[in-house]
Amino acid sequence: MWRGALGALGAVVGVGAELSCPAGAAGEACRLAMAPSWRSFERCAIPAGSDLGEPLFLTVAEAKDHCEAREACAAFTFEGEDLDESPVWVHFKTSFDCVDAAWVAWRKLDSHSPAAEESTAVSAFMASGLGVALCLMGQVLMLSYTHVALEQHVLQVLKPDVFLYGPRGSDAEPAPELHSLEDYVVEEKWEVESIRDRLYAETRNPSRTIDVDYVQVQGNWFGSECLDPPLQDKRPGSAICWYYSQQKCLEMIQKQEHQRGQPYQWVVVSRFDFRWLAPHPPLELLKADVVWIPSGSDWEGGINDRHAVIPRRHAESYLSSWKILTSGRARDVMLDTLGSMKLNGFPGPNTENFLKARLQFLDVEYERFPNVAYLTCTLREKSRWTQCFGTASNSAPGWLYKEEMEHATRIANCVRSSWNKRKMEDCAEDISHLYRGLR
């Protein structure tokens, strides 16, 4: 049964299966459940160009009924304030977009959303989940500095099956040194990447989606400096490569689940360059129905995207970045959750905002645990768009973000060598004031 569930999960951002309800009174409850829901957007005008017929003089309630009766209708918009009882000239649209104006827009949302489909699909196999899958991504060369603490504080605590993904320069290039991780690794994949080609090949209407819709949304959520060559705006960051890496991790985990005939109970995603100062919180202290994310690094109103402990039924949602990106829905997901002012403003969404938007859009709840790790670096092994601090030597490890390192150090000094329920509360530290909200 769980194999069928995994198949359904592959369509996290796809269109749901056609559903039908019994005719007559017997199907009334079913039809009500399947009726679309609506979301309003103040100071939002849907641009011209996707009109569905001529404007009609209707109330909001009448406009909803009119739009629901037409499959091609995706939204409607009108000038003025959102007054349910007063008729206005309503413009019906086949697609949804938003520009700042003294208008109101209403968007039709399917009741059988991807999140609802996913929750139903996974419920059958979650009860039989067993064990932990840990996927590590990023700069694998940093393992030479992080592997000892990683084994002591994470692998020995979680006892996971480990999956590794990263790029390689050529097919002839040897696999990287795994140090103490070798005994835990179930599968490793080092790929001569052609992510730029894959992005254009897998994205719906790529010339419009990538080169117009996505490029217009500022921010490092669409960073492409890791691509060869970068996209036309040469946006700093490696976000697109990170989304691709997450997708490869998910595929490896699904493959292993298929081979062993049983899903995992937890999926953990993390980075090679995370320096652990104290043990990872044991799973028995974490509620099994929410995603657990370490504290701190909620840049510009987003949510920390460095590490996550994910109940298996939420793994496809958390790791949905590549699927949502290539489906052409990334802009809409952020518009629905972050709002038009944040989406269209400066500096634009970052990767943390995009993660928060996906979790909210897919109805995934998350909680925080006190963070005991930080991103490390050396002057030799660092990305092109960051600086390494706290070291004067090319080979000695330092840190990327001082506030993250100090935050993790304080919590590690509180946790010391072990966790308990009380430490989950007593060692917590709120540093949200260090991360400015998205403008």
Image (cartoon, rainbow, N blue to C red):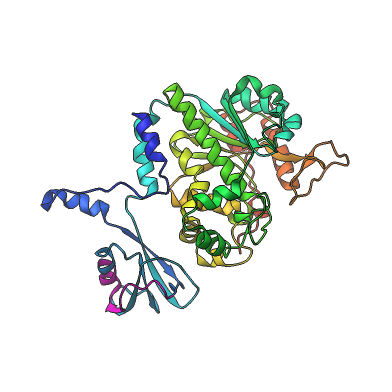
Q: Identify the image quadrant of residue 125.
A: top left
Task: Indicate left or right for 367 with 7 as reference.
Answer: right
Residue under the point 64% across and 61% down? 232
Res 411 seen here: no
The C terminus lies in quadrant: bottom right
In front here: 432 or 331?
331
How far across and down, in percent of the image, does residue 45 sit? Answer: 44, 74
**Residue at 80% across, 40% down:** 378
Whether 80 is among the magenta residues is no
The reply to whether residue 172 is in sight is: yes
- 15 up-or-down from 398: above or below: below
Which residue appears farthest toward the right when viewing the image? Answer: 392
Which residue: 58% across, 37% down? 425
Q: Where in the figure is residue 362, as x and y percent of width and height?
A: 43, 48
> Vertical placement of 410 versus 386: above or below?
above
Q: Give the range drawn in magenta.
A: 48-65
Q: In which quarter of the image is residue 55?
A: bottom left
Query: Residue 411, how many percent across, how many down?
Result: 68, 37
User: At x 26% / y 52%, what residue is drawn?
Assistant: 34
In this image, 28 relative to 356: left or right? Answer: left
Residue 289 position in % (x across, y down) = 44, 36
Q: In this view, does 326 lie to the left or right of 179?
A: left
* 170 vs 262, nearest the viewer: 170
